[in-house]
Amino acid sequence: MPLHPPIEPHDAGTLATDDGQALHWETCGNPDGRPALHLHGGPGSGASAGTRRYFDPERYRIVLLDQRGCGRSRPLASDPGVDLGRTQTTQLLVDDIERLRELLAVPSWVVRGGSWGSTLALAYAQAHPQRVDALVLAAVTTTTEREVRWVTEDMRRIFPAA
């Protein structure tokens, strides 16, 4: 899939959660276009200038979210005081997406996820099927214990420098 030309956000903000998270979001593309949400992979990555380019900015209102603990959201998952078991659950992430949809007054949207974002996109679509017009999934992962161990530990045998 070819990338679209680089673009800058026309709006951005912070979504505050009840448990002290401050989630960064931004929108770009056509403010009147078809809403499309991009869910980044992980662990710990975030939305970037490159991810703005996945959708045609003439046709889509592109929404990017730095998930809990990632990118420009705070606190970062790497902060010593963060209790990952309490603050980084799939259900909380799904709830965050739904609150962002409500904040931006989006009736429904196309949801694109890559890697961990594909798992999160599927979880969101299961919880809120009426809010998802279409799913675009890339580098689909199931996040089983074995798969996570392969990506985070075993892969070093093949790519030791990485």
Image (cartoon, rainbow, N blue to C red):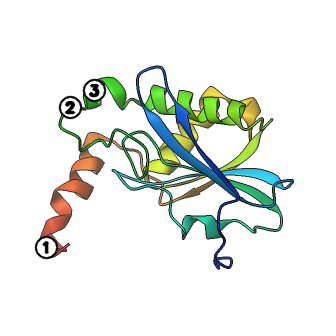
- Please say if 45 is above or below 84: below
Residue placed under numbered mark 3 in the picture: 85
Q: Residue furthest top?
A: 18
Q: CA distance from mark 1 to mark 2?
A: 30 Å
In the image shown, does 141 or 42 lie closer to the viewer?
42
- Of marks 3 and 2, the one in the foreground: 2
Q: CA distance from mark 3 to mark 1?
A: 29 Å
Percent from the top left, x then y, of residue 62? 70, 56
Q: Amino acid at mark 1?
A: Pro
Determine contact: label 3, label 2, CB under 8 Å.
Answer: no
Residue placed under numbered mark 2 in the picture: 81
For the N terminus, the image quarter is: bottom right
Q: Which mark is residue 160?
A: 1
Percent from the top left, x then y, of residue 23? 49, 39
State the SS at label 2: loop
Circle 2: is it few (<14), some (14-19), or many (20+) Cα within 10 Å?
Answer: few
- Of marks 3 and 1, the one in the foreground: 3
Left or right relative to 142: residue 25: right
In the image shown, does 85 or 23 lie closer to the viewer?
23
In the image shown, does 106 or 162 lie closer to the viewer?
106
Determine contact: label 3, label 1, CB under 8 Å.
Answer: no
For the C terminus, the image quarter is: bottom left
Q: Amino acid at mark 3?
A: Gly
Circle 3: is it few (<14), some (14-19), or many (20+) Cα within 10 Å?
Answer: few
Percent from the top left, x then y, of residue 69? 36, 42
Percent from the top left, x then y, of residue 30? 81, 60
Q: Residue at x 41, y 21 (%)?
A: 19
Left or right relative to 160: residue 36: right
Q: Residue at x 59, y 35 (%)?
A: 97
Tell me if I can see residue 133 in this picture.
Answer: no
